[in-house]
Amino acid sequence: MNNIPPSSSLSLLDKTILVTRSVGQSSQFSDRLTEVGATVIEMPTLEIVSPSSWSGLDNAIAHLSDFHWLILTSTNAIDYFFERLNTQNINNGALAKIKIAVVGEKTAQSLKQKSLQPDFIPPNFIADSLIVNFPEELSGKRILFPRVESGGREVLVKEFTAKGAEVTEVAAYQSCCPNSIPPAAELALQNKSLDIITFASSKTVQCFHKMTTKLFSESTINYLEGICIASIGPQTSKDCRSLLGRVDVEAEEHTLEGLTQALIKWVDSK
């Protein structure tokens, strides 16, 4: 894990940045960008809500003792998984014999807020690293994987299964595209008054493209000409290239602080 020193200078002064995150999850990142001088406009591109059915997760919770590992790849998965435990009056003691793996320091911190320590955090904050660096032989292991209901990557399940694990996927939450663009964000896009647009997940890219396709009379790719497209990591960058035509900045450390530092470095290089 890299420890990136926070920047105290106003490195992003005079830069207007559009932050595309889920509803209710933008503020910390926006505050950090503001600290280094940026003007931030928020455009939530995801709404996180309950799954269409709790039956899969409820059934898994009823059989927690059957599993060797619990895999949590996002703070959303943690929030909804533990909310469901609480709904059923089950405390953390039910997880005492299950090892927990998380992806990313932010996810680890979210778990610690539940008074639990992860047994494994991969060295790189991407899901693929979880597979490559998994600390145990996977053959015969039973894994519980609470995840987004649809639209998530399938690589974890495929790779774990290929290595002999038995993976139980259950829907813990849904991520949906909002129906409207906030007026300030719409105006900034139409006036082309943005310097940078940030994307912290593939789904934010997908929903941004879907939402702006309705807004622009010309293609989104043409409309974003001259605006820096900044991505948190490789998979998000892949979607940027596919849907938006390019990516200009990719974080070396796949965290929001890593993305902030990548933007500072990009601006400094200009």
Image: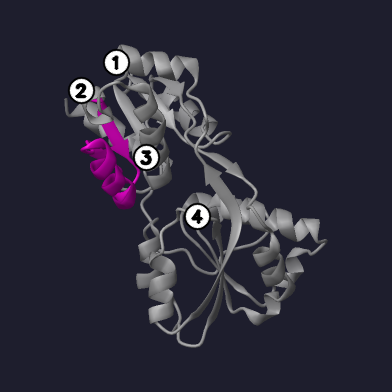
Within 10 Å of disc 2 (Cα), the crowding (few <14, some 14-19, many 20+) is: few
Residue located at (40% from left, 13% from top): 187
Tell me: 44 left or right of 92. Answer: left
Q: Are marks 1 and 2 in contact (CB under 8 Å)?
A: yes
Type of the residue with mark 2: Gly
Residue located at (23% from left, 31% from top): 266
Tell me: 213 left or right of 148. Answer: left
| Chain-order first, disc 4 or disc 1 | 4
Q: Give the x, y percent position of residue 219.
A: 25, 28
Type of the residue with mark 3: Val
Q: Is residue 61 visible in the rendered structure shown here?
A: yes
State the residue position of label 2. 226
Q: Give the x, y percent position of residue 134.
A: 42, 74
Residue placed farthest to the left in the image?
Answer: 270
The secondary structure type at the circle numbered 2 is loop
The secondary structure type at the circle numbered 4 is loop
Nearer to us in this view, 245 or 19: 245
State the residue position of label 4. 150
Q: Give the x, y percent position of residue 64.
A: 69, 74
Query: In 3D space, how far apart are the residues under numbered discs 4 and 1 (Cα atoms)?
Result: 33 Å
Give the residues in magenta.
224-251
Query: In 3D space, how far apart are the residues under numbered discs 4 and 2 (Cα atoms)?
Result: 33 Å
Nearer to us in this view, 149 or 81: 149
Q: Quadrant of residue 216?
A: top left
| Chain-order first, disc 1 or disc 2 | 1
State the residue position of label 3. 205
Residue placed farthest to the bottom in the image?
Answer: 140
Type of the residue with mark 4: Ser
Nearer to us in this view, 208 or 105: 208
Q: Judge whether residue 225 is colored magenta.
A: yes
State the residue position of label 1. 192
